[in-house]
Image (cartoon, helix red, strand yellow):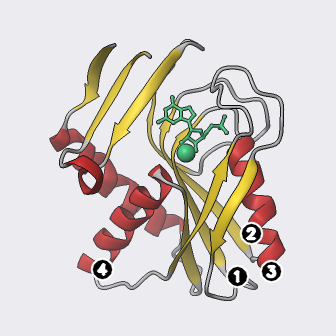
Amino acid sequence: KNLHTIIEPEQFRKILKRMYFELMEKLKDSEDFAVVGIQRGGVYLADRLKKIAFENGFELPTGKVDITFYRDDTFYRLEQPHVKETQIDFDVTGKTIILCDDVIFTGRTVRAAIDEIFDYGRPKRIILVTFIDRGHRELPIQPDVCGKTVPTRMKEQIVVHFKEENGTDRVEIGVM
Ligand code: 5GP
Ligand code: MG
């Protein structure tokens, strides 16, 4: 594998903080909000934002949706992602949902997550937060808050490590 680091731990944490403040700016007129992470990377991102919120005196309820593709080819997939499991133990109706994922690519996963959330009720608003936008969208879906836009080739992949998972906050890019 030839991976190289594009975001080091210190910058990683700066980006997270900036994302948190950008998010709070967008939420300033909402009262009732909750975070939903897309498994697995999105859940780490949601937890980090939740942690920063807590340090700033806010408590954010959280839930998660687990979505995978039938075929495990990241590069060419036209099918609808498949929802494996959802854990949302609060009423989404009337809430502002902060939907988090580590990487946005075609946009199909986010679309599936939005569909899934609507099975649980009718949110007032959904805000999309992604750590990395690697481009190549196939649907008109864009993040409202994004950590970093990283133009990629189709065959390249982004690897996002959260310290909760393996001890370091780091983003790498490479051909897998
Ligand atoms: P999309 O549905 O937008 O095509 O792909 C986004 C989903 O696939 C996200 O849940 C994300 O975790 C995963 N994904 C797509 N491309 C990459 C990538 O380059 N790196 C990582 N870590 N995940 C990716
Ligand atoms: Mg994912």
User: Is the CB–ligand 1 distance for label 2 below 8 Å?
Assistant: no
Instruction: Give the image quarter of residue 115.
Output: bottom right
The correct choice, above or below, for 65 with respect to 160 in the image is below
* Ligand 2's quadrant: top right
Q: Do labels 3 and 2 touch, CB within 8 Å? A: yes
Give me the disc on residue 117.
Answer: 2
As helix, strand or loop, the secondary structure at mark 4 comes to helix
Of marks 3 and 4, which one's residue comes earlier in the chain?
A: 4
Q: Residues within 10 Å of mark 2 (few under 14, many from 20)?
A: many
Find disc 3 in the rendering and name its residue.
121
Q: Residues within 10 Å of mark 1 (few under 14, many from 20)?
A: many
Instruction: Judge left or right: residue 70 versus residue 44.
Output: right
Find disc 1 in the rendering and name its residue.
92
Distance between the Cα atoms at labels 3 and 2?
A: 7 Å
Find disc 4 in the rendering and name its residue.
54
Of marks 1 and 3, which one's residue comes earlier in the chain?
A: 1
Viewport quadrant of the N terminus? top left
